[in-house]
Amino acid sequence: MWQKIVAAVTAFGKGIAWLSDNLGWISGALSMLMMLFILREVVGRYIFHSPTEWVMELSCYLLVASTYLAGAHTEMKDGHVRIDFIYMHFRGKTRNLVNILIYMIGTCWCAVIMWQGAVMAWDSFTTDARSESTLMWPLFPSQAMIPIGAFLLCMILLTKLIKNLSELFGNRD
């Protein structure tokens, strides 16, 4: 029974890994786009004395999207911050137990972010909330990136949690 669960989670994890990898590329493209917008603003403001109203606000929205969409990709590459000078001293089952604890806490944290992000995004969608600038950008698209990114990160953490549990307890049936 346990082997079937691990096999199903592994297959699901591969799909989530593919999606998070592609979203990592999209996040990088959003960062490049944001950089170009800010470059345009700097050149326009200081060389041509022609600032815009939309660059900073749009850059903030792109930053939210880029950050949350890249979170799952970063976790897949083991790129999140951890205390390596302590973590490197753990071996075998101890390291597995530490990983399980980290993945459990991370999954709970992501679940809360996903839930509260969804509440916030849904509220913005239903009330047609807009920014307070003169452009009045809709808030929903950037806010929707929060629960989407948190969901993907949560799924990757769950996949890693089950993998570590499988390694800890072996292939019992």
Image (cartoon, helix red, strand yellow):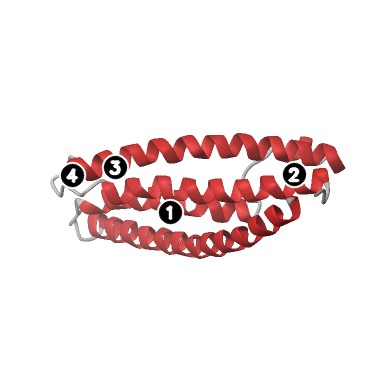
Q: Residue at x 63, y 37 (%)?
A: 104
For the residues labelled 3 and 1, the Cα–Cα distance comes to 20 Å
Q: Amino acid type of disc 1?
A: Ser
Q: Which residue is mark 3?
A: 122
Alpha-carbon distance for marks 1 and 4? 23 Å
The residue identified by callout 1 is 66
Query: In front of the other: label 3 or label 4?
Result: 3
Residue type beneath disc 2: Leu
For label 4, the crowd category at 10 Å Cα-Cα, with few meaning under 14, some 14 to 19 and many 20 or more, is few
Q: Determine which residue is flagged by label 4.
A: 128
Q: Is residue 91 visible?
A: no
Find numbered disc 2 in the image and state the secondary structure of the residue it sits on. helix
- Left or right, 52 with reference to 73: left
Q: From the viewer's perspective, is the residue at label 2 or at label 3 nearer?
A: 2
Looking at the image, is mark 3 or mark 1 earlier in the sequence? 1
Instruction: Give the numbered dot on residue 165.
Output: 2
Image position of 164 (left or right of 89): left
Residue at point 69% right, 35% down? 101
